[in-house]
Image (tube, rainbow, N blue to C red):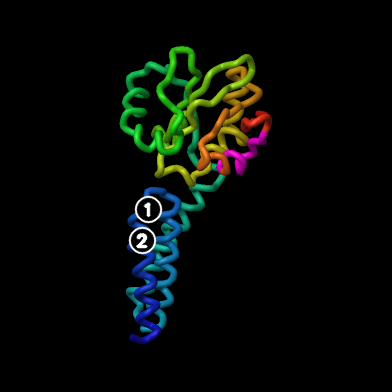
Amino acid sequence: MSWVEVIGYVASAFIVLSLTMTSVVRLRLLSMTGGLIFVVYGALLPSIPIILTNAAVAGVNIWFLRREFGPRRSIGAVPIEPDAPFLEDFLRVHADDIRRIWPGFDSLHEEDFVLLPIRDGLPAGVLAGRRDGSTLRLTLDYVMAAYRDSRIAAWLYTGPGAKQLRDAGFSTVVVQNPAPGHTDYLRQLGFRDVDGALVMQL
């Protein structure tokens, strides 16, 4: 096997691996990388069709990644009643994934505050908690696998989305006894350790 063939196999591996990704961002990053390696492979052959096709593939992925992280990306959040039928169905469909990330979550309660994060006009997750004065005590902060690399949480806690929480009367978000796998994620967002809990000032 020549080293040129090795480059072709590596490019193919990136493309195939991209198709296994549940995250849209990771799918596009791997597909873009595979496309760029294929451009190199095509230049070494040389093969103009391989170069043109994969340059286009890489370009399309770059375009969508720019949209994903650019200022005009479509992210929002809408309040929803805890007993809304759509919300109940959403939680049921994603129950196994939610339990893996938030093992302490059981169900929503009538008095809970609930937001539905939106990505490109579609529901992307659920944020829920109990109101304690101006503090929101989180019981669930879930984003679907496809959107976990889209920085929705950063938009909600430290970006423009924080206004929705402030307008709802919250100045602090608290996570009591977070799951071990979730703790680092919350700290990266800016949550601080305070008396055994993780706290974010909005």
Residue under label 1: 21
Where, quadrant-wise, is the C terminus in this rendering?
top right
Find residue 170 and report its horizontal and vertical position in percent.
Answer: 62, 21
Find numbered disc 1 in the image and state the secondary structure of the residue it sits on: loop
Find numbered disc 2 in the image and state the secondary structure of the residue it sits on: helix
The part of the chain drawn in magenta is 185-193
Asked whether the residues under the numbered discs 1 and 2 touch, taking CB atoms below 8 Å apart as contact, a structural biologist would say: yes
Residue 147 falls in image quadrant: top left
Residue under label 2: 17
Pick the front one: 93 or 193:
193
Find residue 110 and report its horizontal and vertical position in percent.
Answer: 44, 13
The answer to whether residue 192 is magenta is: yes
Query: In 3D space, how far apart are the residues under numbered discs 1 and 2 (Cα atoms)?
Result: 7 Å
Q: In the picture provided, is 117 more to the left or to the right than 93? A: right
| On screen, residue 188 above or below 34 | above
Find residue 27 and report its horizontal and vertical position in percent.
Answer: 40, 55
